[in-house]
Image (spheres, rainbow, N blue to C red):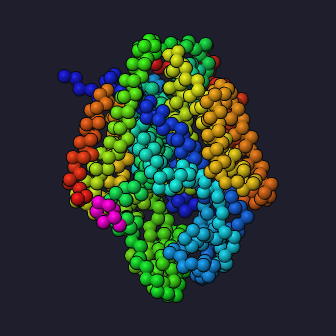
Amino acid sequence: MTSFYWQTIDAGAALLAAATTLAGLFLVYHAWRHRSRWLTPGWVIIALSCWPWVAAAGADVGISLALVVLMLGAIAVVAVTGQWQRNGNPRRQRVPLDDAERDPSATAREHRHRLRRALVRLLAAGPLSAGAALTLVMLLAAYAAWPESDRLVTAAMLAPLLWGLGMAWSCADSRPLRPVAALAVLTFLPLPLLPLW
Amino acid sequence: MKLSLKPTAGLVRATLASHSVLGLTAAALMYVLCVSGTLAVFYKELERWEQPTVVEVQSVSPQALNRAAAATMARVEEAPEHLFFTLPTAELPRLIVGADEVSWFASADGELMQPVAHDWTHFLIYLHIALNLPTTLGLTIVGMLGAMLVALIVSGLLAHPNIFRDAFSLRMGGSERLGQVDLHNRMSVWGTPFHLAIALTGAFIGLSSVLVYVAATLFYQGDTDAAGASVFGAEPEPTDVAAPLADVGAAVRRTTADHPGELPFYVTIHEPATTAQVVDVGAHVPRRVVWAERYRYDAAGTPMDTLGWADGSFGQQLYASTFRIHFGHFGGLPVMLAYVLLGASLCVVTATGVNIWVAKRRQRGVPADAVERMWAAVVWGVPAAIALSALTNLAAALPAAPVFWLTTLTLVAAAWRLGDARAWSRGLRIATAILAAAVVLAHVVRFGGAALTPASLIVNLVWLVLAAGMTLSVTGLPVDALRRLQPQQPIESRRT
């Protein structure tokens, strides 16, 4: 018995689509390797290959397959064209120490400072980012003028995305109190708008 | 004023620092999820591999379904809330009938046979979706890790200003750190669509119980069933008034007749043998990634409504599409194999991420030897512990979750103080190779010829490929082969 999904895919169109995607990838690689002007045509061909993919397997399966072939094709190109030959004895490049690593008295100071910053970042990346994401998506679920299932599912799908963005920002900002303040505002300020009380 | 989309050096530095902090915080658990998820792609084959002697059926008649339903009701002591049927398909050519928590295989005639008992596959799936913790807690932690993966993807892309300049460069012949950086960056950049899809759908699945609870508290007076009804469909109100058992065969026959081209693959009877009972039939929809379309029938098999997972609202279709996207079950074996390769690439990204941090520390003259040893124990110990759990479960019926976690934690604790990272890496790869080969041997000894049935063969081949891969990685043969493919002079790097 052949897989149900395999039976419903048009094999000829799928082969054409895969060849088109890989041809586009080859042009992108060529542009990278030889600094040629094939970069944009390569990406255009990759985008156009979605059309035979959709014809072969439908819109959602087809585009998923296009991405899978593109990703695997690119990783294969990287592996095959990678530089595997030993390049003599690699020079061990010494990275300079920062102040905390160089000076023992600075180390203790720096460690305390880093610990404080880490705790603030943890607060921002964990509970505050989660809280802000939750408050925002619940506002969407409460007020968007969409059908109920659209509001709930879109909110649920956006929650991890917003939480992830909040985490990334919390850990990247050179002033850790800035995301703390902003995320706290986003978490607590809109709460009265939710039908909680 | 010059407008540039290129991130500033300060932003790159900050996002790189953020990327390191997030990655180091979650690396070990994320790696466990990556490895278990990569293997769990084959969960249907693993279920067949665990019980290879079960008689497989290609199709089942409506009469046989009704017989199986009646036999199940006769076998259970308490009236169940649900009867479940898994109908035979190419991926799982077995008829399974269940009542709430217990289930049995059934013959093509609807006669009940041995109980379903794929404890090891169950362990592997729960390792992936809940880290073997109590379900709601575990799902939530895994959902959080999914959100962290989103953060890692975003910060990783922002921290990579030369994304095109380095698009295909892989310099494995130079310094160890440069090789690890290239491997990490190339795999992660080209795998971004897969990583993002896995992270978002995984976080969505993991956090959904918390989100439904919050939505229910805010908008539905705490009624979680009502909160999910517009997406999952409503459960019927129990009546506890006895009635003849629903004609499940008629419902399946009607689905096949009314929806040609679709393939029914599961059935649920809610509140069976009561006046409240309804029958849900789930069918594969061609050329769609939705889990199924779900058709509801009354006890006589008369259509009541369609849930709309395939053609309903955007939200319903989005929800129904998350599972096949996450598990790679939308294109048969080729897509599953592609998912295994992409899953393995995510394992490599996770492993090299910590390796880069360790190499950087060493270059700075402040080596983190204990972390390096412990990380080697995680990276190579997790596959070894998974193989050991399979072996001990197969050979001695030991519960897999304690074996896996005790082995992993013992290895990490031992690596904290003992040996060096290279020895741990080498030793655990050899151990994984031996254990994976031993799993196949134990399977053949226990099941004889049934170990060579198609599904068992696929899984046994995966174990053997794992054993061979580990052995080859110790010998360095794959890298030597790639070196032989290339000219003697190294390809000039674009980065000078």
The picture quadrant where one finds residue A125 is: top left
Left or right side of B334 for B52? right
Which residue is rendered at x = 43% and y = 35% of the image? B22
Picture coordinates of residue B47 (x, y %)?
A: 64, 59
Picture coordinates of residue B110 (x, y %)?
A: 64, 78
Which residue is rendered at x = 72% and y = 56% of the image? B397
Between A33 and B238, the one nearer to me in the picture: B238
The picture quadrant where one finds residue B377 is: top right
- Examine the rendering and report whether any part of residue B296 can be seen: yes
Q: How many marks?
A: 0
Question: Which quarter of the figure is the C terminus of chain A placed in?
Answer: bottom left
Q: Which residues are magenta?
A: B216-223
- Examine the rendering and report whether any part of residue B261 can be seen: no
Between B353 and B207, the one nearer to me in the picture: B207
Picture coordinates of residue B490 (x, y %)?
A: 58, 18
Picture coordinates of residue B423 (x, y %)?
A: 68, 27
Left or right side of A98 for B85? right
Q: From the viewer's perspective, is residue B165 above or below residue B210? A: above
Which residue is rendered at x = 40% and y = 66% of the image? B232
Q: From the viewer's perspective, is residue B30 above or below residue A151? A: above
Between B146 and A63, the one nearer to me in the picture: B146
Residue A91 colored magenta? no
Which residue is rendered at x = 36% and y = 54% of the image? A156
Between A14 and B441, the one nearer to me in the picture: B441
